[in-house]
Amino acid sequence: MHEMMNLLPAFLGGLGLGMVFFGGLWLTVQKGLRSHHPALWFFTSFLLRTSITLIGLYALAGDNWQRLLVCLLGCLVVRPIVTRLGRTWKPESPARGADHAA
């Protein structure tokens, strides 16, 4: 039981990192589809999200592989949640070029 309590902060931190990573990806897709420079949005977002996530994982795990695994689990738990929330969200305006679709 004591060991589980030591892993709880790593799991909660993993949830936060997952929200940053997958929530940031969702925002990037929303903004990138409406942008005149989508490649810049996607590339910059990828670098920023990946850097934050890797630094956070390194900081939360320390030298303990169990904390790293629990932190990764926390990150992965967030993915289906963000995916489900993203499906229910309605964009403010149609995607660029949507009126030209056949």
Image (cartoon, grey):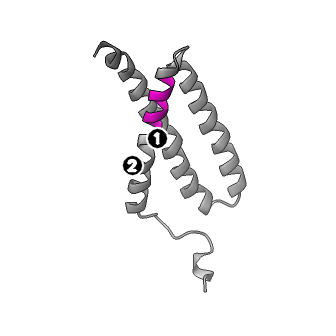
Say what amino acid the circle numbered 1 marks.
Leu
Q: Residue at x 42, y 42 (%)?
A: 78
Query: Residue 24 in the image: x percent, y percent?
Result: 53, 44
Please tell me which residue lies in front, 2 or 100.
2
Q: Quadrant of the C terminus?
A: bottom right
Q: Compute the Cα span from label 1 to label 2.
A: 10 Å
Looking at the rendered structure, the secondary structure element under dot 1 is: helix
- Please state the extent of the stretch shown in magenta in the rendering: 67-75
User: Label 2 belongs to which residue?
Assistant: 81
Say what amino acid the circle numbered 2 marks.
Ile
Above or below residue 70? Residue 88 is: below
Looking at the rendered structure, the secondary structure element under dot 2 is: helix
User: Label 1 belongs to which residue?
Assistant: 76
Closer mark to the observer between disc 1 and disc 2: 1
**Label at residue 102:** none
- Quadrant of residue 8 in the image? top left
Q: Residue at x 68, y 43 (%)?
A: 44
Above or below residue 51? Residue 40 is: below
